[in-house]
């Protein structure tokens, strides 16, 4: 029977993705100026190996790996949740300007000089701006917005956030601070410590719990908002919860990593051929895929030979934007007639 | 209100963006009836259906099964109404079976892969009644219009609610499917469900329904047995048509014929 079959496929896909994430996590811990084999990494994690190996793995690379995993996962999850909420395969946090807005919030904190004093000001400002941006986007685009309206509104909001960020840098009296902000905006997981992990992780976990708790409502929403409402889903409340979940996750992530785009867009699409289109079943596999993508990208930036380090946010965009173009081609028909 | 009424409305008013689209609608409908809600375009048929289901804000009183609609939780309402909107939209290519299983959502069966035996039975009954069993494993987006509308109907029947509200369930179907869908709704009514159907097909409305409600400019202008509610006068005044009228095998035939 297909029912048992689809459940088995979901199990196999989820297990496979989890294994892939575990492998990439080990790879992430082993990659850097000093290359370590997976066995050495495990040994060092368990308290074996030399002092230097333990410091490299446990204190330098572990926070970076945890952030890569958590941020990738929340981006993948947010993308799947937004696509489920809006019944729209092109929905994603970055196309809606959420990370850009969160970045503006964080940059404002840095420029005002509040960020170092109260470090939680960074994620809180990021979350607030991300919430505002998605809230405004859904308000502007309207309840039953088509692809075109959502994308246009998202473009407008991310442009506004970008301009606001540029203005802050423009007005910054210290050119070095501006340069630092510019690099931070590119998105990176380099030199992150457990302090950063503590800063972001609680928000990411809270966001993930909120989004996953709503999974079954996304399935009912496949039949449209009115039918979902008639089946007992409080659609207005669902919207607010999803916006809050995405804002918590993305805002928390951006506060420590800068903007890392397109993972939320790409991850659900990679999973659908494996487990089907059910928006509820997509959430966890999308999160795992997002984690795998960001871990892999973060390994790649350390392996690719270059004079200066490549920022991981740059790499995800370089890969993500052509994928976005491919999706546009695929959705061309819907986009062409999609104003209504 | 009538104690026997399954669904009753008193002085129902609905305003959409400041404009009153339903004026003082009162009705009282018992279980086990097929009720056709007819009226020209823009008369407010869909609005009335949505208001009755609690999907559009309204003033006045609505009672379902003896309870005030406003006193019921969203979940409790969902158990009482099977609501079929126009268009039968499904946004993702889900297997048709999963779509039907969503009818059990109000009963707590939120995951089609994990239905209780009771929910499984309800889904199967609905699929058999609408004759969709043969293609339920296929993605709903790949089905023909007729097949998709039957899947949508199965989803509504799977709720096993005492009231079914269907908004133009036979629009854009070929004649055979139109008759099939109406027979399905008739069977549901004969089993004790109150079925309210919005339709433009006066012929099928006259043939299959027990009661016809005629809505014109947001007002209920006639209600009663088809031959009375769809009288010559009403057809002329409300629909601006004349019709061929006859009896065929003890059933009322009304065939819209010319404009007046």
Image (cartoon, coloured by chain):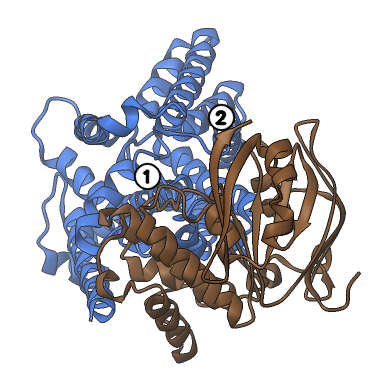
Numbered disc 2: what chain?
A: A
* Viewer-proximal residue among B5 and A287: B5
> Which tint was used for chain A?
blue
Looking at the image, residue A141 sits to the left or right of residue B220; the answer is: left
Contact flag, marks 1 and 2 (Cβ < 8 Å): no
How far apart marks 1 and 2 lie (CA) works out to: 20 Å
User: Taking A157 as reference, is A313 above or below it?
Assistant: below
Measured from the top left, where is residue B252 in percent x and y?
59, 62
Looking at the image, residue A212 sits to the left or right of residue A66; the answer is: right
* Viewer-proximal residue among B112 and A164: B112
* Quarter where residue B44 is shown: top right
Looking at the image, residue B94 sits to the left or right of residue A87; the answer is: left
Numbered disc 1: what chain?
A: A
Chain in brown (letter)? B
Crowding at mark 1 (Cα within 10 Å: few <14, some 14-19, many 20+): many
Which comes sooner in the sequence, label 1 or label 2?
2
Measured from the top left, where is residue A332 in percent x and y?
26, 30
Q: Identify the residue at image location x=78%, y=76%.
A: B65
Per the image, label 2 sits on a secondary structure element best described as helix
């Amino acid at each position: 029977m297909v029912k048992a079959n689809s459940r088995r496929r979901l199990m196999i896909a989820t297990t496979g993705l989890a294994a892939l994430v575990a492998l990439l996590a080990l790879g992430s811990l082993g990659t850097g100026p000093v290359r370590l084999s997976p066995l050495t990494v495990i040994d060092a994690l368990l308290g074996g190996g030399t002092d230097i190996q333990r410091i490299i793995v446990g204190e330098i690379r572990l926070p970076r790996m945890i952030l890569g995993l958590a941020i990738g996962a929340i981006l993948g999850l947010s993308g799947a949740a937004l696509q489920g909420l809006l019944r729209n395969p092109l929905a994603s946090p970055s196309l809606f300007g959420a990370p850009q807005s969160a970045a503006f919030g964080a940059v404002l904190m840095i420029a005002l000089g509040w960020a170092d004093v109260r470090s939680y000001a960074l994620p809180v400002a990021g979350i607030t701006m991300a919430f505002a941006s998605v809230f405004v986007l859904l308000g502007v685009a309207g309840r039953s917005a088509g692809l075109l309206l959502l994308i246009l509104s998202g473009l407008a909001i991310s442009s506004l956030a970008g301009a606001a960020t540029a203005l802050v840098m423009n007005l910054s009296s210290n050119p070095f601070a501006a340069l630092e902000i510019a690099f931070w905006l590119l998105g990176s997981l380099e030199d992150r410590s457990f302090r950063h992990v503590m800063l972001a992780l609680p928000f990411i976990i809270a966001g993930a719990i909120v989004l996953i708790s709503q999974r079954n409502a996304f399935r009912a929403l496949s039949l449209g908002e009115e039918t979902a409402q008639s089946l007992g889903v409080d659609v207005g409340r669902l919207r607010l919860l999803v916006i809050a979940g995405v804002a918590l996750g993305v805002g928390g992530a951006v506060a420590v990593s800068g903007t890392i785009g397109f993972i939320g867009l790409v991850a659900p699409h990679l999973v659908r051929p494996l487990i089907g289109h059910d928006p509820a079943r997509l959430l966890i596999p999308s999160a795992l895929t997002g984690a795998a993508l960001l871990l892999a990208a973060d390994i790649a930036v350390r392996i690719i030979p270059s004079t200066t380090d490549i920022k991981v946010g740059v790499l995800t965009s370089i890969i993500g934007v052509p994928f976005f173009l491919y999706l546009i081609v695929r959705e061309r028909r819907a986009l062409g007639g999609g104003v209504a | 209100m009538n104690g026997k009424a399954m669904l009753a409305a008193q002085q129902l008013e609905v305003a959409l963006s400041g404009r009153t689209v339903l004026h003082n609608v009162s009705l009282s409908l018992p279980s086990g009836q097929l009720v056709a809600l007819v009226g020209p375009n823009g008369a407010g048929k869909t609005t009335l259906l949505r208001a009755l289901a609690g999907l559009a804000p309204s003033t006045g009183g609505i009672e379902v099964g003896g309870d005030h609609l406003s006193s019921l939780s969203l979940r409790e309402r969902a158990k009482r109404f099977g609501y079929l909107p126009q268009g039968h939209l499904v946004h993702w290519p889900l297997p048709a079976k999963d779509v039907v299983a969503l009818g059990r959502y109000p009963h707590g069966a939120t995951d089609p892969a994990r239905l209780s035996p009771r929910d499984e039975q309800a889904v199967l009954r609905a699929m058999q009644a609408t004759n969709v069993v043969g293609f339920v494993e296929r993605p709903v987006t790949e089905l023909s219009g007729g097949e998709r509308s039957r899947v949508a109907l199965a989803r509504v029947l799977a709720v096993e609610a005492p009231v079914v509200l269907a908004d133009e369930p036979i629009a854009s179907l070929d004649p055979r499917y139109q008759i099939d869908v109406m027979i399905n709704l008739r069977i549901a009514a004969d089993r004790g469900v109150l079925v309210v159907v919005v339709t433009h097909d006066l012929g099928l409305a006259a043939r299959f329904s027990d009661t016809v409600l005629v809505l014109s400019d947001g007002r209920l202008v006639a209600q009663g047995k088809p031959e009375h509610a769809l009288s010559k006068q009403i057809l002329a005044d409300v629909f601006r048509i004349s019709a061929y009228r006859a009896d065929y095998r003890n059933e009322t035939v009304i065939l819209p014929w010319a404009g007046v």
